[in-house]
Image (tube, grey):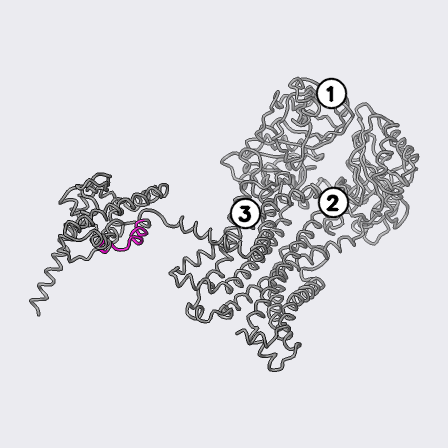
Amino acid sequence: MAPDRSDVLYGRLGLMVLKTLQALGPLHGYRIARRIEQISGNQLALNQGTLYPALLKLEQMGWINSNWGTSESGRRVKIYSLTRPGRKQLEKEEAQWQRATGIVDRFFKISENAS
Amino acid sequence: MKALRTFICRLAALTRSRQHDREIDDEIASHFEEATDEYVARGLSREDARLAAARDFGGITQVKQIHREVRSFTWPDNVRQDLKYSFRRLIKDPAFTLIAVATLALGIGVTTAIFSVVNAVLLKSLPYPEPDRLVVLYSQTASWQKMSSSYANFLDWARENRSFSNLAAFRPDDMNLIGLGQPERVPVEMVSASFFRLLGVQPIHGRAFLPADDQLGAAPVALISESFWKRKFGSSPAAVGQTLTLSGTSYVILGVIPATFQNYAGNFHRRDVYLPIGAWNAPGFRNRQQSMGMDVIGRLKPSVSLEQASAEMQSVAQSLAEQYPVVNKGFGITLVPLKSAVVGSASPLLLLLVPAVLFVLLIAGVNVANLLLARSSRRATEVAIRAALGASRTRIVRQFLTESVLLAMAGGGLGVLAAFWGTEAALTELPNVLLPRAEEIRVDQRVLLFTTIASVAVGVLFGLVPAFKASRLDLHTRLIERGPRAGGAHHRTQGVFVVLEIALACVLLVGAGLMIRSLVSVLRIDPGFNTDRLLVARVSFPVSATTPDHVMAVWREMSQAFKTVPGLQEASLSLDSVPMTGNFSTLPFWLEGDARPSTAAEMKWAISYIVDANYLKVTRIPLRRGRFLTPEDNEHASPVIVIDDRFARQHFADQNPIGRRINFDVLNMTAEVVGVVGHVKQSGLDESETSDRAQCYLSMFQLPAHVMPLAARDIGMVFRTADAPLAQVDPVRRALERINGQLVMYGERAMDGIISDRLATRRFSMIVLGIFAALSLLMACVGIYGVIWHWVGERTHEIAIRVALGAERRDIVHMVLRDGAKLIVAGVIIGLAAALGLARLMSSMLFGISTHDPLSVAAVTSVLTFVAFAACYVPARRATRINPMVALRSD
């Protein structure tokens, strides 16, 4: 049984988490949420809470790891980091994403030219 | 792979659910603090910062719930909740719960009991290694499928076959044990040396028989059973090597056979002593024509099928017939798997009881389904509220199913207990001739597993309809109307259930009716002799050193001695055959004037009673013609014979048989017919006309001298007593002891008891079917009563209006009874149709009536209809007591 892609990536939330961890290294939940909000220019009205089930799913897939550590402010937080299979998965997803958006892009351009 | 990984993660998370809950709580808390800090840093007050953080986060409870669902399975939690809730609901409604559990306990209990019998008798394999390869070999002629075999033929079979890794012969006997405490009669099995090897049995002490022990002239040796070893030797290992004196011969004990060995040959009844059959020197035993009750068992080689072996043995029989045409011509060999040979007799009974008990279970289940339906209509509001609060339909169905399964499990638990004690009690009451392997019947793991599965299945199956009905509610009407009437959609289902119950009860009642009628017609059969106060027993005495003269002297002494016993009105001796006891032998003969048949298979056969002159007086068999044997028909007179009217009809047709002469080859004797007597039922009241054979009576004093000592080893006695037959056992025993201390009496029975035991299967199946039918009738009545009661309750409003408009009490009663009548008539019609179809299954158990016996059908129909109407009448009365003012105003 193949895992349901959209479910795993939680409407691409999972993909964003993976990308964030790749770019910034290990982070705790709040930092990940803030980072996604910042990158999206606060256009993605994310309920920060929904991040946690998504993190759990990614962890169950073996794509990220979690460990208890301390934040910059000295609090006990759970810190997530990308694993090797996670990195591979991200590369795969990224390539697919590029290809898909590329096609859609071209499609829109053709439509514009036609109109 | 990923799915499996997720599954394992979830599975692992099941165990530490508490800890995971704490972790997510901590994580969310630190998230909040970080977020609050950030907002404070941006200039908000602490209070506003917290609110802002909460707004960003969204619903904490939902997040936690989703987290839980992602983390692990939710069903254990749901099941726990459903169970808790169901349990509370059931406790709150004790009357309903009690009735439902009791009904299910009844249904599951009887099913478990019958299954435990089926399990032990039919399903469990026989207690030998690789039991499927064990086969019984019978001799076979055109008219007899399964006969005992002769030792000479057995030896040839064993030598010539290629299909069996081993063949073994065995023959039950009883012998007198003298010298170890009181003289007693011990059950003996004579077996060939291969017997224990074939069945995979090792002695716990000493050794088993070797081929050298299994020869004529070998030193007499014996094996003893563990229980005999314990009883007679206190389980001392020194028993091996000691001697045992049985019927005048001393045997050296070679070893002890473990108690775990179950001897199929004795239908799993214990044998105390085993002797090598090949060392038996009885005259006639090695005569190819005589079987002397010996049977043969074989173990198939691994690669050989039953069919291949049958074909091969057929050709072995063929070559033996060519070698010994006189005795073996027309003889074949029948192979029967050991298991069918052992349990075959029980199959008709079990084939009857299994469907019957399933019917009872079905009725119980349907009854509970109906109760659940009625209850669910009362619970409609509760369901509607749950649905309004967001419970999915699946969840509601699951909740209802949890409840019905819980009920069924409770019923199953009680049922197992009932079955446990019930079967134990029932089995001790039963004569042990009824069921082979009865000793193995118990509630074991397999039975428990069966009951568990059956309970769950019943719970789900019969909970399903009510559950779906209950969950399919129109929320709006339910919550707005809030009255009992909105649940009325169940009517048709309830009606169908009741019709089904009545139909099933009808089938069982017809079955029970047919069995009762059969037993009655069996009991009306004339056995051909007077059974009243008749005592039968056997006596044996050692004949090693006796002559025919001595034997006859002892017989005459016995007859004299019995005259002095005041409790005996008449006494007689019968060498072998005694009616109803299972003891009988047949003799081949031909009529003088006919050509002598050249082979045994072409001979005519008759059951032979070799008796003294008193026999007719004791048994009161009617004399039809001529005279019976007299004391003058003795060793000095020329042989005479008395035949029964069946013999006369079969062999002399309309001619007068008196004065005709009959030749008996095996006895070297020609006897003149002097009289004709009535036919006697030899093998039970219900023996079929076709299997019943011609009978003849010879004087025991006219037996040829060479067979006399053997015949005298073990003879039957028949007494007519003044009152209770068994009270005369001790006086008779004392009289025998006075003649000779070595005369051992055994097998004393009252004839009435023997006949009653012979009918045990019939009576047992009648009683069981009767109980099942009564239970099903009761449950069907409770079912129809409950439904009509429920309908009346729901139609209170309508009835009240009718009464207000002037309907009479009688009209109301009629109206309600009409509803009931529809169900009853439909149920009875369907039930009778099914019963007439199914009765064919039990035709082998019926006697003297057809499967469509009109009297049974009429009786069942009237009883069922009457009782069902009575059950409807109570709710009908309730309807007449509805007060229109109260009923209409309350709405």
Which stretch is magenta? B55-67
Coordinates of residue B877 in the picture (x, y in percent): 65, 70
Q: Is residue B520 visible?
A: yes
Residue B757, numbered label: 2
Q: Nearer the viewer, mark 3 or mark 2?
A: 3
Q: Nearer the viewer, mark 3 or mark 1?
A: 3
Q: Chain of mark 1?
A: B
Residue corresponding to mark 1: B250
Q: Secondary structure at mark 1?
A: strand
Measured in 3D between alpha carbons, the distance from the residue under mark 3 to the one under mark 1, in whole angstroms, is 53 Å
Measured in 3D between alpha carbons, the distance from the residue under mark 2 to the one under mark 1, in whole angstroms, is 37 Å
At label 1, the amino acid type is: Ser
Disc 1 crowd, CA 10 A, few/some/many (<14, 14-19, 20+): some
Residue corresponding to mark 3: B451
Coordinates of residue B805 in the picture (x, y in percent): 60, 82
Q: Secondary structure at mark 3?
A: helix
